[in-house]
Image (cartoon, grey):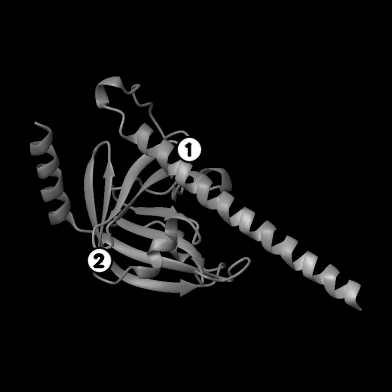
Amino acid sequence: MQRVKQLLSCLLIAGGAVLLFQGARSFLESRFGQSVAEREFEVPPSTRSQPVEGAPPLGDPVAKLVFPRLGAQLYVVEGADSRELLRGPGHMSGTAMPGTSGNCVIAGHRDTHFRILKDIRKGDAILLETRNGQYVYRVNNLRVVSPSNTSALQPTADAELNLITCYPFYYVGAAPKRFVVEAGLDAAASASAGRSATQSGS
């Protein structure tokens, strides 16, 4: 009986060590990915390669995502597969680009980059800065939905933003639901932000 207890203790310790290692690895990979994305996004325009027509290459940084009230910012990369989401929140290819008409969808992991969404509120401003300008969105709804509910991915006529992550935030294992932040473009605030950026850059 004593051996069984010792074996169980060893197995529990080993399991805990594996979980700790996996968590630490995910955290470090997410931080490193954001560091690289920041450097690539902040490259001065004069030294950037000329953009190509069509969608950005997968993994390329496409926007800086800022939550002013929460004092947080993230760099968004193109693509929402597992490889891209290690680097940062991923702009879902095929959806509208930030600031343009249509539905811009950005997904992220609840246990790394998009853990910040647990503190977001209706009415919060969300800034999306691209290489073409700065755009301000205003949160108008927060929803918890099933994975089969794809309404947040549907095209829209107006400029909208949907941020998606898994839910609950502290669930152990594969989370059973999705948390959706719905926001609409604040055209007046976006125009003001664009003018401020132009003046500061002149």
Is 2 positioned to the left or the right of 25 in the image?
A: right
Q: Secondary structure at mark 1?
A: loop
Is 112 positioned to the left or the right of 99 in the image?
A: right
Residue linked to disc 2: 124
Residue 170 visible in rendering: yes
Q: Quadrant of residue 176?
A: bottom right
Q: Quadrant of residue 120?
A: bottom left
Q: Count neighbours of disc 1 (C-alpha within 10 A) and say few if under 14, some if 14 to 19, many if 20 or more.
A: many
Q: Name which residue lies at 38% across and 60% down.
A: 162
Determine whether 135 is above or below 199 in the image: below
Residue 59 bears which disc, if any? 1
Q: Position of residue 178 (x, y in %)?
A: 50, 68
The answer to the question of whether label 2 and label 1 lie on touching residues, with beta carbons closer than 8 A, is no
**Quadrant of the drawing holding the N terminus:** bottom right
Query: Disc 2 residue type?
Result: Asp
Q: Quadrant of residue 141?
A: bottom left
Q: Name which residue lies at 19% across and 58% down.
A: 186
Q: Position of residue 166 (x, y in %)?
A: 51, 65
Q: Name which residue lies at 68% across and 59% down.
A: 17
Tally the marks: 2
Name the outermost residue toward the bottom.
Answer: 1
Q: Position of residue 67 (x, y in %)?
A: 28, 58
Is 107 positioned to the left or the right of 64 in the image?
A: right
Q: Position of residue 147 (x, y in %)?
A: 56, 67
**Quadrant of the drawing holding the C terminus:** top left
Q: Secondary structure at mark 2?
A: loop
Q: Count neighbours of disc 2 (C-alpha within 10 A) and say few if under 14, some if 14 to 19, many if 20 or more.
A: some
Residue 99 visible in rendering: no
Q: Name which residue lies at 26% across and 27% down.
A: 44
Query: Disc 1 residue type?
Result: Gly
Give the spatial CA distance, label 2 vs label 1. Answer: 28 Å
Residue 3 bears which disc, if any? none
